[in-house]
Amino acid sequence: MAESLGLSLVKEKVKQPERTLPPLPNLEKHGRVHVRFAPNPDSVIHLGNTRAAILSDEYAKMYKGLFTLRFEDTSPSIKPPVPEAYEIIRQDLRWLGIHWDEEFIQSDRLPIYYEYAVKLITLGGAYICKCTSESFRKRVTKKKPCPCRDLAVEEHLHRWENMLNGKTRMGGAVMRVKTDLAHPNPALRDWPAMRIDTKAHPRIGKKYRVWPLYNFASAIDDHLMGITHILRGKEHEVNMLRQIYMYKYFGWSYPDAIHYGRLKIEGTVLSKSKIRQGIEDGVYKDWSDPRLGTIAALRKRGFLPETIRRLILEVGVKPSEAMISWDNLESINRKILDPIVKRFIFIKDPMEFEISGLDKKYVAKIPFHPDHCDWGSRDLTIDPKNNKILIQSADNANFNECSHFRLMNLFNVKVDCAGKGHLVSNSVADAKALRAPIIQWLPTGLSMPLRIIMPDAKMALGAVDPMTSKEELPSTFQFYRFGFVRVYREKRRLIGYYAHA
RNA sequence: GCUUCGGUCGUAUAGUCCGGUCAAGUAUAUUGGCCUUUCGAGCCAAUGACCCGGGUUCGAAUCCCGGCCGAAGCACCA
């Protein structure tokens, strides 16, 4: 008695409290927390991109702060925005459960950037450089100023006018922010802030010919929008250093920035440009191709927003790179899904199998969920006249001659040396004694075909319980001994996308 | 090459700031057991890590130095 009590005490495990994010720095300095997510609408978002969004959202909620969504679409030529992407990104964010308080699109804000460009030039913090990028780079690597740098402010304002009014052609001039030519990192020296791009912007056309570069637009906006904390990848570390020079000219103080390492997921490409290329080349079907790590793909396969959020929170904000395993992601999803989705029978690569020795009608009750009897069950029947069933070819291949198996929730079958099946007994105890594997099955008359797209984009064909088509679709189910599948109605048929086992 | 930032079980993460309670916790994975009329989930157990070398210290995963390895950046992209 005492022993058992002691044992149960020892065995009682203290559940770890759910992981929480570390506190944000300098809270007292800033007042109300204000974060932002600033995607480039040149394509949809993927798992890696959600990191900034989810972390920002978590912090906004944690501190009851504000969240700004800002589309950074200031490159008509090199990373042109995709008009549909704005709304697709909004939908992906909503699906992820992210709430934003305000939204901006940078291509609507050109007059603001122009205003601050003039201010910065007037302040002597920026100049218009007419050097070619090669000749500028040559000088700057030697820590030498280009000839434009020390010209009078009036000249630079004049050059700026020429950029705007079309007298200077594309590539003819660029606005640079003065930094420190002696800075050990050449990447920081007099970085470009504005350039001419005459290509039509997919969203607002040819209204403007001078466009801000990332560091300029982003830095101006972060200040003007009152951003207190920035969460972004460490590829932006030097950008912060660049932008700080500009903040100093304006007398602004830079937000607190947290730079996390890149997120990778094993065996999956998480690069927008590679994904886009793959779609263009026809390697991938579209943005939701099951091989991709896009939000669209994960959603299609039945991954839940909560799964993605938990994963991001678990990985946290470390500056080192993180290689996520699908095992981990799947495990999180499985634990959420398992107790809440219905189960059905799916027979992959079905084959007919005849059972002899039936003396009466047998009924198997297949529960819709083993842990929720109140969800009901599905009756599968077999009788002497209808004694053919469907089983998985792979299961059949595993039967050695003269072996046994059990049909799920029905009875035990002996396979004779000719490969024929005979009913031998009913009880589970017998099945265990015989070490008979238990397999899922369907009566031959009761099945409908189902194509399931697997994570590698290959197709699995099989027979599914037709009752699935009576369910509200799309819906995610667990197919006994097969895995979790999200089932969609496609015209008059069903199609499934496999999530994981 | 240059600049910056990192390196804890296979993977992810806690601990590192403020040395001792860390002969290093947790999740996942794998293996075994229990439970369950299957699978899964759940429960129990096992496996498995402080990059290397010096130094400081009574004591180093934690501090210092050197090395090795890795990542990010070095665009008129974001």
Image (cartoon, coloured by chain):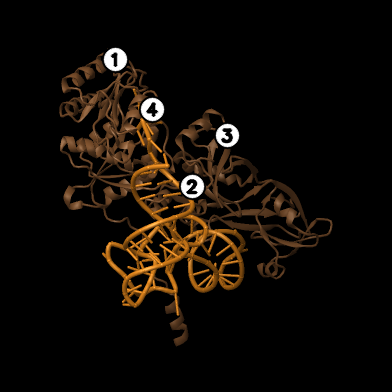
Chain colours: A brown, B orange
- The mark nearer the N terminus, 4 or 1, is 4
What residue is disc 2 on? A265
SS at circle 4: loop
Q: Residues within 10 Å of mark 4 (few under 14, many from 20)?
A: many
Q: Quote the CA–CA distance across marks 1 and 2.
A: 46 Å
Label 4 amino acid? Pro
Give me the disc on residue A168: 1
SS at circle 1: loop
Q: Quote the CA–CA distance across marks 4 and 1.
A: 25 Å
Question: Do we see residue A31 in this rendering?
Answer: no
Q: Residue furthest top?
A: A167
What residue is disc 4 on? A81
- Do the dots labelled 1 and 3 sit on one chain? yes
Give the foreground label among 4 and 1: 1
In the image, taking residue A110 as reference, residue A48 lies left or right, namely: right
What residue is disc 3 on? A492
Q: How many marks?
A: 4
Kindly check if marks 2 and 4 are in contact, taking CB atoms under 8 A apart as contact. Answer: no
Chain under callout 3: A
Give me the disc on residue A490: none
Q: Position of residue A438 (x, y in %)?
A: 66, 60
Q: Nearer the viewer, residue A486 or B72?
A: B72
- Asked which quadrant contains residue A83, the reply is top left
